[in-house]
């Protein structure tokens, strides 16, 4: 069995996701009572030992971040749950918030306590209207328990403005502050100067859910899954030519091929039935050849060795009939439309890439594309521009994918 | 005026830069964002660095929009407010006792004089709630440093000097003068008002504010000029107008002013000007005053066509240079004055501006270290500059922070008096005047360029008043005061309080606002009360129907 | 030494005051980095990315205009990656915007050996000139979106906030709000945006007209420093005069009163001095 259920509630879970009973059933009341009685340093030390890494894409060690915010100077601090989830092929945070909204919120409350914040925000993608209501009711449940409110932490929901870029942490702060969602230059990092120029802890929904289950159990339980380097489980989103599309929780270290083929996971490639390529990590991700899929497992070192990254956990599957040039054009359009327009490499670069894709120049202007892609990776302000050429460059590195084009 | 009395020289005590790092900025009667836009940049730098900005103004303006707090006081009630602030600071013992002890005089009398100025009393006059007065007093007094700025709003009242004195009292209470990031700053309305004062264009002063009644001073100038100087104080502008009225003054030489339109009660002005035997006007335009003149001397546009210096509101003396040639027969002021002297039989040489400046600086300690070369290379210098290597003085009156202060600064007791003209049933509204950003004074200079906002004059009236009077937005109305009347479009505006209307004097050829204003003047400075005149507003068609 | 940091720039060790930006540090050792959007009196906008340098240990290149020097940093101003980015930035801008009166962009293109053709042929920012008032003109086909005008109109000087960036991606542009004409906007015509614009996208009407008629002649223009004749602030004006006509007014960037900024009267109110009316 490759599928596990820890972040996602077990199939036998019967209570309503927003109820007090659910808190008990999942052990979250226990987690809160236990964690909030600890000294902040103890919480941070536990998170650090757990090895949790950020699940929003950058895989930054969560304990290090908490420690920075906690140490940062400032009388006012904030914590933010990033639920903007607008990456292509990514819908795991939605599923998590639908099925178990209390988990991420409990992680948020523990985070606030650990860094000394009195105010928290949930920044949720504008289209997730129903999830937003679920989340609001879950917050009420925590309020009744006394964890949220004047004596705990105040939690406010903010709705995103329908822009992918608003999920970038500093653009998200600008958005909450009522400004245009443009990323800010880093440093200073959010840990020292985030929301309203105060030290801010911002985490992805799934990261916070990991914190909740960590404190609902213990380190030993938490580290039972995963690899030496990458502890725990990961939500992956399967889409495209796959028989069982959806969100699955798998331990780090699961072979990529199994994620596609296992009957309780992907259940094998659909369409022609023959794998053409996988796009791992969403629009900003990397194309993997069938060979690479066969030889890698889902963890950071293994994928890093072939220049790929897990990103948000999106796995898009293409059978061998798909024209990848068409896919790359789609991705190029996405970035050109979502670029905030602030910096030159991304504002103009994404447009030029789109134009070149539309005129079918992927394989004829490789040196121009490489130079442009390198400049975008090197000189764009934020992750959007820096990763916009990644998928395209990954195809150029894998000429064997060309015959599909 | 007030500053000269208190500190010996009539100039702002800080540099603009001091706004950047101060903790508290109090603007009284100043719409700096429109009247002094570049000083406002410095003020906003301070605000972005954390300073609190409080603006006292009867109107909502672009300046009040950026303020942390706006106290929209009744026209002409500043002294009541300022005295009440002093009252609270003294009552709650928030003043800087050490500074007051060491560097000031007259505190006890002042304490007694504001004892009756309770916030309740001031609230009744200013329309500002007592808790706001209390809170402002506390915040001002607790700020580690505070800058106070004011403009015409304060000085164009019949009690202008008292207004300034009341601000000086506040600054002394907080020790907010003579040190960085704290000071008293009159924002000068015209480009070289400060320079004119510096050069002794005052009834009782020689260059550098040197006192004409001091024999040693007179002797120094007499030796340099080879003439004897009268020890008598001259007339100020109001006294001159009075003398014209009485027939005691029969000839007038006006340089670069347009009093017929810029002075209050213009009908009266026209009358006394027409009584003159001789009127000479020197200007770059044929102004309304010029049209009445016996002789008009065409001048050059000083800033672009002639040489010299201007002094700005932070005492910075800067070089003015000719960038273009003047048209026709226009000559610069120095040439004209010299020629006049020669025509009168004096053997004045035709000097260059720099020679005149050099002569002056050798007689004036404040200017001594300035040369034309230095002024040009160093983007001007802030006086005093007592020696040639001296870098100029950012802060004035640092002596107040010496261990032993010889020349102490006096508190002055000032009493509030209502505006000379009260509203009556016949004239139920108070007219107050001011400036708009794109325009300037009587518009001689500013109505020439093609500004998109150049839509002429209008009167701001609160919609409530307008509705009572049956006036629609943009109706042309007739405004009448005891002295005259004008017709002007009315604009609904929430910027003024009910009971008050607002106009500028930028477009005198279309709307002669100063036909309405009152020439009641401040006995001390001679500034007229532009800021408050009782008026009545009528719908035009109603009058026509009669 | 207290309050200083020592780092190396292109192998050369240099000690600078704490808080110095990498850009300033590079200038100090005479390895200057080119800039477009950076301006000495404005907050660094960080938008053009022409000033990037390579810092050892940093995954991406670093914008030197806003990165503060740290002890032990190893900085390269001319590595292969730096040169590539610089060149691409120039090429991308040349592919969208009319650089005919943008000296900074022209020189960036020259020093980076940019090939203006490489990324051209696609969409550009060509658009009609907007002449909706007689003081300044918006010729946004020249704009490089450096944000200078937005900052000068906002926090950094004027605090009017009349212009901002609207739209996103390639459609991002300078706007006075809802695409309005300037007279309908909050603009107060101080022209401080014009003063800081590096490309001529915002340009005085007078200069625009003279250039359009081919009469603008740098060789015939003299510049004279003087002082504004309106209010008592005392702003220094540099009068740009051609054929005995004032055609433009600026103020020195290092002037303690203005920092290069003026109000509408100082910048555009000069006509009275040369109107036909004088006596
Ligand atoms: C263009 C862009 C979009 C992003 N969108 C999201 C998002 O929707 N959700 C998210 O959690 N992180 C997103 N991120 C990553 C965040 O900036 C940030 O790294 C993350 O919220 C940190 O949380 P974590 O450490 O828990 O992953 C985005 C980054 C970029 C560059
Ligand atoms: S990289 Fe793209 S999205 Fe990010 S700041 Fe630059 S233009 Fe905006
Ligand atoms: S108009 Fe000029 S100043 Fe404004 S963004 Fe464009 S190029 Fe920069
Ligand atoms: S430019 Fe504006 S603020 Fe400066 S002196 Fe002239 S009128 Fe005053």
Image (cartoon, helix red, strand yellow):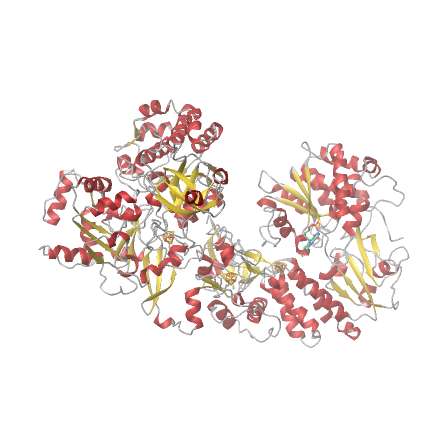
Q: Left or right: B316 with respect to A188? A: left
Residue at figure coordinates x 47%, y 27% from the top left: B130
Tell me if residue B497 comes above or below residue A179 in the rendering. Answer: above
Q: Is residue C175 above or below residue C106?
A: above
Tag count in the figure?
0
Residue A252 in picture, x, y percent from top left: 80, 53
Name of the residue lying farthest toward the bottom: A364
Q: Percent x, y for residue C278?
A: 28, 61
The foreground one among B494 and B213 is B494
Q: Quadrant of residue B241?
A: top left
Q: Is residue B39 visible?
A: no
Q: Position of residue C30 (x, y in %)?
A: 45, 64
Q: Residue furthest front?
A: B546
Quadrant position of residue C127? bottom right
Q: Is residue B433 visible in this depiction of the protein? A: yes
Residue A388 appears left or right of B387: right
Q: Position of residue B385 (x, y in %)?
A: 26, 47
Q: Nearer the viewer, residue A127 or B257?
A: B257
Q: Quadrant of the C terminus of chain A?
A: bottom right
> In this rendering, is residue A358 above or below B29?
below
Answer above or below: position of C86 versus B218: below
Taking the image as shown, residue B156 lies to the left or right of residue B544, namely left
Q: Quadrant of residue B298?
A: bottom left
- The residue closer to the viewer here, B400 or B319, is B319
């Amino acid at each position: 069995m490759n599928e596990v259920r820890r972040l996602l509630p077990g199939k036998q879970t019967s209570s309503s996701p927003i109820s007090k009973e659910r808190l008990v059933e999942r052990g979250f009341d226990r987690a809160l009572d236990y964690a909030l009685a600890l000294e902040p340093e103890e919480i941070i030390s536990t998170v650090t030992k757990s090895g949790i890494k950020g699940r929003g894409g950058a895989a930054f060690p969560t304990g290090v971040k908490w420690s920075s915010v906690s140490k940062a100077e400032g009388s006012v601090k904030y914590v933010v749950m990033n639920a903007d989830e607008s990456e292509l092929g990514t819908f795991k945070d939605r599923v998590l918030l639908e099925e178990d909204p209390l988990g991420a919120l409990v992680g948020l409350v523990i985070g606030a306590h650990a860094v000394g914040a009195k105010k928290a925000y949930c920044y949720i993608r504008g289209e997730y209207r129903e999830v937003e209501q679920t989340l609001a009711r879950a917050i009420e449940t925590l309020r009744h328990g006394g964890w949220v409110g004047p004596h705990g932490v105040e939690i406010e929901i903010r709705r995103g403005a329908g822009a992918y870029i608003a999920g970038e942490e500093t653009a998200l702060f600008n958005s909450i502050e009522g400004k245009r969602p443009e990323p800010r230059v880093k440093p200073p990092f959010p840990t020292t100067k985030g929301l309203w120029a105060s030290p801010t802890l911002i985490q992805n929904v799934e990261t916070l859910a990991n914190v909740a289950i960590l404190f609902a159990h213990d380190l030993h339980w938490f580290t039972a899954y995963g690899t030496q380097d990458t502890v725990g489980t990961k939500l992956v989103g399967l889409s495209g030519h796959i028989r069982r599309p959806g969100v699955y929780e798998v331990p780090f270290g699961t072979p990529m091929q199994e994620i596609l083929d296992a009957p309780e996971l992907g259940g094998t490639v659909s369409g022609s039935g023959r794998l053409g390529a996988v796009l791992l990590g969403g629009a900003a991700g990397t194309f993997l050849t069938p060979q690479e899929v066969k030889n890698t497992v889902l963890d950071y070192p293994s994928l890093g060795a072939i220049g790929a990254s897990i990103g948000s956990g999106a796995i898009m599957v293409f059978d061998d009939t798909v024209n990848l040039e068409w896919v790359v054009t789609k991705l190029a359009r996405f970035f050109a439309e979502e670029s905030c327009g602030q910096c030159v490499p991304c504002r103009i670069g994404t447009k030029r890439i789109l134009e070149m894709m539309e005129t079918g120049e992927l394989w004829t202007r490789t040196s121009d594309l490489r130079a442009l892609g390198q400049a975008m990776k090197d000189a764009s302000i934020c992750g959007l521009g820096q990763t916009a050429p990644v998928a395209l460059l990954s195809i150029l590195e894998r000429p064997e994918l060309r015959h599909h084009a | 005026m007030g500053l000269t009395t208190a500190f010996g020289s009539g100039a702002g005590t800080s540099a603009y830069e001091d706004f950047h790092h101060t903790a508290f900025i109090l603007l009284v009667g100043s719409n700096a964002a429109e009247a002094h836009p570049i000083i406002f940049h410095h003020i906003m730098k301070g605000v972005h660095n954390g300073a609190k900005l409080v603006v006292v103004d009867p109107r909502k303006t672009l300046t009040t929009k950026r303020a942390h707090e706006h106290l929209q006081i009744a026209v002409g009630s500043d002294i009541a407010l300022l005295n009440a602030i002093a009252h609270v600071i003294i009552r709650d013992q928030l003043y800087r006792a050490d500074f007051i002890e060491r560097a000031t005089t007259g505190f006890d009398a002042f304490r007694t004089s504001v004892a009756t100025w309770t916030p309740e009393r001031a609230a009744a006059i200013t329309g500002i709630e007592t808790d706001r007065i209390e809170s402002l007093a506390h915040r001002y007094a607790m700020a580690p440093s505070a800058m106070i700025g004011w403009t015409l709003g304060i000085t164009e009242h019949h009690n202008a000097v008292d207004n300034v004195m009341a601000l000086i009292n506040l600054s002394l209470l907080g020790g907010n003068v003579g040190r960085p990031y704290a000071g008293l700053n009159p924002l000068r309305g015209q480009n070289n008002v400060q320079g004119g004062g510096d050069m002794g264009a005052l009834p009782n002063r020689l260059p550098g504010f040197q006192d004409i009644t001091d024999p040693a001073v007179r002797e120094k100038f007499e030796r340099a000029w080879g003439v004897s100087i009268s020890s008598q104080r001259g007339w100020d502008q109001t006294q001159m107008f009075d003398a014209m009225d009485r027939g005691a003054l029969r000839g007038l030489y006006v340089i670069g002013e347009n009093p017929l339109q810029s002075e209050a009660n213009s009908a009266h002005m026209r009358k006394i000007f027409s009584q003159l035997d001789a009127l000479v006007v020197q200007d770059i335009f044929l102004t309304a005053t010029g049209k009445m003149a016996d002789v008009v001397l065409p001048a050059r546009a000083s800033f672009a066509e002639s040489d010299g210096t201007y002094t700005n509101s932070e005492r910075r003396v800067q070089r003015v240079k000719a960038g273009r040639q003047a048209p026709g027969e226009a000559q610069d002021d120095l040439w004209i004055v010299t020629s006049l002297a020669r025509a009168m039989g004096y053997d004045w040489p035709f000097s260059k501006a720099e020679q005149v400046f050099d002569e002056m600086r050798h007689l004036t300690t404040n200017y001594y270290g300035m040369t034309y070369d230095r002024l040009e290379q160093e983007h001007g210098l802030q006086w005093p500059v007592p020696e040639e290597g001296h870098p100029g003085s950012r802060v004035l009156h640092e002596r107040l922070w010496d261990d032993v202060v010889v020349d102490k600064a006096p508190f002055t007791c000032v009493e509030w008096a209502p505006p000379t003209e009260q509203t009556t049933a016949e004239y139920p509204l108070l007219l107050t005047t001011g400036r708009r950003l794109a325009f300037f004074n009587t518009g001689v200079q500013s109505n020439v360029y093609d500004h998109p906002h150049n839509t002429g004059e209008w009167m701001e009236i609160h919609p409530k008043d307008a509705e009572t009077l049956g006036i629609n937005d943009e109706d042309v109305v007739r405004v009448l005061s005891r002295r005259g009347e004008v017709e002007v479009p009315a604009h609904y505006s929430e910027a003024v309080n009910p009971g008050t209307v607002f106009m500028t004097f930028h477009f005198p050829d279309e709307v002669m606002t100063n036909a309405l204003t009152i020439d009641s003047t401040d006995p001390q400075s001679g500034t007229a009360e532009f800021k408050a005149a009782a008026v009545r507003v009528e719908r035009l068609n109603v009058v026509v129907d009669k | 030494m207290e309050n200083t940091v020592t780092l190396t720039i292109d192998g050369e060790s240099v000690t600078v005051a704490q808080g110095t930006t990498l850009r300033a540090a590079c200038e100090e050792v005479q390895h200057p980095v080119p800039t477009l959007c950076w301006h000495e009196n404005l907050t660094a906008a960080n938008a053009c990315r022409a000033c990037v340098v390579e810092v050892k240990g940093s995954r991406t290149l670093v914008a030197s205009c806003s990165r503060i020097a740290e002890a032990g940093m190893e900085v390269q101003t001319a590595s292969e990656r730096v040169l590539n980015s610089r060149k691409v930035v120039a090429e991308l801008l040349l592919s969208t915007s009319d650089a005919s009166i943008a000296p900074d962009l022209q020189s960036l293109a020259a020093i980076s050996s940019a090939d203006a053709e490489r990324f051209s042929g696609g969409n550009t920012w060509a658009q009609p000139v907007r002449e909706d008032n007689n003081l300044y003109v918006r010729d946004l086909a020249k704009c490089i979106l450096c944000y200078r005008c937005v900052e000068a109109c906002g926090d950094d000087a004027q605090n009017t906030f009349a212009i901002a960036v609207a739209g996103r991606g390639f459609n991002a542009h300078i706007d006075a709000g809802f695409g309005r004409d300037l007279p309908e906007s909050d603009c107060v015509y101080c022209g401080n945006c014009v003063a800081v614009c590096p490309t001529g996208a915002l340009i005085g009407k007078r200069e625009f007209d003279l250039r359009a008629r081919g009469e603008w002649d740098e060789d015939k223009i003299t510049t004279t420093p003087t002082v504004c004749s309106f209010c008592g602030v005392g702003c220094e004006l540099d009068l740009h005069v051609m054929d005995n006509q004032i055609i433009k007014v600026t103020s020195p960037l290092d002037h303690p009163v203005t920092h290069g900024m003026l109000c509408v009267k100082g910048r555009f109110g000069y006509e009275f001095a040369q109107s036909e009316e004088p006596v």
